[in-house]
């Protein structure tokens, strides 16, 4: 709606883009990849994975390159986790959530991670479970509005 965009730009410059994005995602449950001006198809707001990745690496010093491995079966889970989670539970979790797990190295400690929709689940080698906010706070990125699944998207390269 060009007229609406023009009015919002007139009153708020480009400051309304992120607010509208957050409001829309919260109220409609859909992820906004970009906002486009319908007059000339000019991108007003675009999420850049590369920009976030560069910020995490260069500014925050957080680099998950080669520190994420996909877990698709119980045989992918390192033996260190045997004391914290039974192999049959790994299979149950993988099948129940229909989502892969990931083995992630965070500050020298290994965690199993799984995106469970609204929740993100972590389990360390000792068998302790963590909420996503605990891990994001430990990394110092809790205020960035990122989920750990965003970090997986940025850093995990699926082998072809």
Image (cartoon, helix red, strand yellow):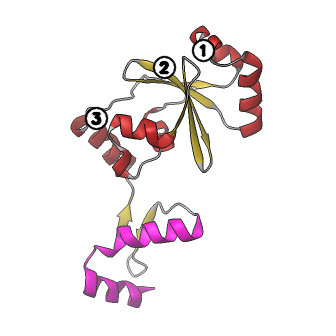
In percent of width and height, residue 138 lies at: 37, 34
Would you say 25 lies left or right of 63 here?
Answer: right
Q: Which residue is mark 3?
A: 57
Q: Is residue 103 magenta?
A: no
Q: Residue at x 58, y 26 (%)?
A: 70
Q: Nearer the viewer, mark 2 or mark 3?
A: 2
Q: Residue at x 39, y 76 (%)?
A: 37
Q: Residue at x 55, y 17 (%)?
A: 126
Q: Residue furthest top?
A: 79
Residue 101 quadrant: top right
Query: Marks 1/3: CA distance?
Result: 28 Å
Q: Nearer the viewer, residue 33 or 124?
A: 124
| CB under 8 Å between discs 2 and 1 | yes
| CB under 8 Å between discs 2 and 3 | no
In percent of width and height, residue 96 lies at: 76, 37
Q: Which residue is mark 1?
A: 81
Range of magenta residues: 1-29
Say above or below: 104 vs 80.
Answer: below
Q: Which residue is mark 2?
A: 110
> Mark 3 packing: few (<14 Cα in 10 Å), some, or many (20+)?
few
Q: Residue at x 52, y 66 (%)?
A: 26
Say above or below: 103 vs 12.
Answer: above
């Amino acid at each position: 709606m060009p007229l609406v965009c023009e009015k919002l730009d007139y009153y708020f410059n480009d400051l309304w883009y992120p607010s509208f994005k957050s409001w829309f995602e919260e109220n409609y449950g859909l992820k906004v990849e970009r906002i486009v001006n319908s007059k000339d198809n000019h991108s007003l707001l675009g999420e850049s994975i590369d920009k976030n990745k560069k910020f995490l690496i260069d500014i925050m010093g957080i680099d998950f390159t080669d520190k994420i491995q996909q877990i698709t079966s119980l045989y992918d889970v390192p033996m260190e986790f045997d004391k914290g989670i039974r192999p049959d539970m790994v299979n149950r979790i993988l099948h129940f959530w229909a989502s892969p797990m990931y083995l992630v190295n965070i500050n020298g400690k290994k965690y199993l991670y799984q995106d469970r929709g609204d929740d993100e689940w972590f389990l360390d080698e000792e068998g302790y479970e963590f909420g996503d906010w605990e891990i994001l706070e430990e990394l110092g990125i809790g205020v960035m509005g990122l989920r750990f699944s965003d970090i997986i998207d940025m850093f995990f390269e699926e082998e072809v």
